[in-house]
Amino acid sequence: MLITTDWTKEYGLPGFLIKGSIPISGIFDLEPIYYSWLQSTLRLNDDEIHKQSPLHQISDNCPPVLISYGEMESAEFKRQSDDYCTALLKKGVDAALYVQPGKNHFMTFHDLNDPDSQFCKRIVKFITQHKKSQLPLFKEIDMHIPL
């Protein structure tokens, strides 16, 4: 949800604080939870579902996004990632999908510990692709936060 925040409007900060996002096996649409066993505990209403679903809160100044999930994830995790990527692209966001071969939901983070893994290499490529287009660094802007 960090990339959906309007940093200027809500906190008086520059709108480009978040330079990019790499969600892994994310939940981008909370609506299916309404119909699950979790609803009796969470008690989500339609407004909360809409406001807390990244799929429905894509900002106009969204940074680049690399969405990743495991090849062996459930159909719902795959659908949500695919739908989120499509929605980002429709809004003009630089977004891409990376499917981790042979991984399930609980294994998608394992390769972050291996700099030679295909996933780490893809992350480095993503960062490198967008590094040149970055806006000013923190030291170049006034970071005074009003209390």
Image (spheres, rainbow, N blue to C red):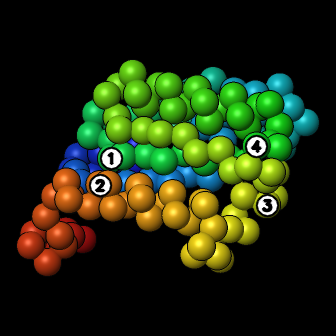
Pointer 2: what residue? 130
Instruction: Please say if the residues under marks 1 and 4 sit with CB atoms less than 8 Å apart.
Output: no
Would you say residue 58 is visible in this rendering?
yes
Mark 2 or mark 4, which is nearer the start of the sequence? 4
Numbered disc 4: secondary structure: loop
Q: Which amino acid is tagged 2? A: His
Q: Which mark is residue 63?
A: 1
Which quarter of the figure is the C terminus placed in? bottom left
x and y, in percent, of residue 13 in the image: 20, 59
> Are the residues at dot 2 and dot 1 in contact (C-beta closer than 8 Å)?
yes
Amino acid type, callout 4: Glu
Q: Earlier in the sequence, mark 1 or mark 4?
A: 1
Judge whether 67 appears above or below 146 on screen: above
Percent from the top left, x then y, of residue 65?
A: 43, 46
User: Quick one: label 2 or label 1, which is nearer the N terminus?
Assistant: 1
- Residue at image x 69%, y 28%? 79
Of residue 13 and residue 125, the one placed in the foreground of this image is 125
Q: Is residue 145 left or right of residue 3?
A: left
Report whether residue 11 is seen: no
The reply to whether discs 1 and 3 touch (Cβ–Cβ < 8 Å) is no
Q: Estimate the x, y position of residue 129 in percent, counting from the top left.
A: 32, 54
Q: Which residue is mark 4?
A: 71
Q: Secondary structure at mark 2?
A: helix
First reached walking from the N terminus: tag 3 or tag 4: 4
Which disc number belongs to residue 107?
A: 3
